[in-house]
Amino acid sequence: MNFAVLQFPASNCDQDALHVLRNVLGHSARFVWHKETSLGDADAVIVPGGFSYGDYLRCGAIARFSPVMQAVQAFAANGGPVLGICNGFQVLCEAGLLPGALIRNRSLQFRCEHIFLKTITTNSPFANRIPEGKLLRVPIAHGEGCYFADEETLRLMKVGNQILWRYVDAAGEVTDAANPNGSLENIAGVCNAFRNVAGLMPHPERASEGLLGSADGRLIFESLIHALETKTIAKAA
Amino acid sequence: MNPVDSPGIRFAFASDMKAKIIITPKKAVLDPQGKTVQNALAQMGYPGIGAVHVGKYLEIEVTGDAEVVRKQIDEACHKFLSNPVIEDYKLEIE
């Protein structure tokens, strides 16, 4: 498969994402600079973490209007899969490709630690390979990861089964203590109504090799690859 | 050259305006910065301190027809300068 990994000024998880896709999973991946207007022959797009445009104004607010994001909008509208990680999640929310927004952590602290994720539904191209009941141990590293959506949006997301991951404790319980940033209902990741665009604050690309202490994050990339290979998700025209 | 004939100065005579934009977090949105500042003010001994909301203030220098400018800046506020999911804004042009 061909992956496009976007690069904005101050992206800093782009190399990690490319490394996992290329060297760990053996697929083809290339960087796409924010000024480019085409995604080429990409089968899927990764919007990586970092501090695009210095996080000025709001996280993701300026990146969302970069030329490459117009191509991503078209790609997503055609059903192509797009995964936003950390700052990439913020960019996709700002772009209106995902519901809600990410605001300052409840604690006002930048949180950098490993957390546990519970997969709420495996009915998604980003979670189909995650075994039932398996908790993912992956790191977070953010200051603005508190997920917010208004009541009506949240209701529609539940109806549409769009909440993909929640922060839980080691026993898999959704508790306030396991919520690292104050996210509404411990939400860590969501998808759009068509299920081809998803975002999460934790970093699966930093937990895709045993050497790094956890390889749980791989399951998210393997899910996406499985969805593409089995054509359960269409490549955008 | 008469200063009024200089293009730069004549341009400055066109309706130069300043857009002043105040962006605040919506009521329903958690505002940990506001809460922290509120606690600090109370701790410092200031009496009667209620809720604090921390927002942003932007000034934009802009030239053009007043009505068009208002419309354009208002659109930019909605589309870009604020995020309607989490923020409200007030726009003044003078």
Image (cartoon, coloured by chain):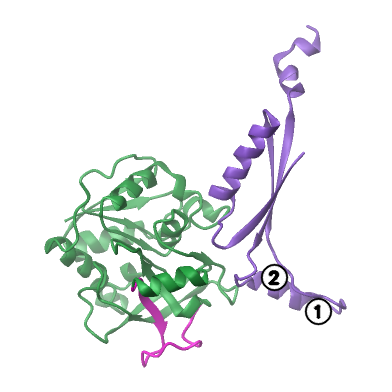
Chain colours: A green, B purple
Q: Chain of mark 2?
A: B
Q: Residues within 10 Å of mark 1 (few under 14, many from 20)?
A: some
Residue A121, numbered label: none
Magenta span has A51?
Answer: no
User: Label 2 amino acid?
Assistant: Gly
Tell me which residue sits at (64%, 73%) in the image. B32
User: Label 1 amino acid?
Assistant: Ala
Residue A132 location, quadrant: bottom left
Q: Position of residue A148 (x, y in %)?
A: 51, 70
Q: Which residue is mark 2?
A: B34
Q: Position of residue B18 (x, y in %)?
A: 73, 38
Does residue A48 lie above or below A161 as drawn? above
Q: Position of residue A139 (x, y in %)?
A: 39, 75
Does residue A229 lie above or below A140 as drawn? above
Mark 1 vs mark 2: which is more N-terminal? 2
Magenta region, residue range:
A161-180
Q: Residues within 10 Å of mark 2 (few under 14, many from 20)?
A: some
Nearest the camera: A119 or A195? Answer: A195
Q: Which residue is mark 1?
A: B42
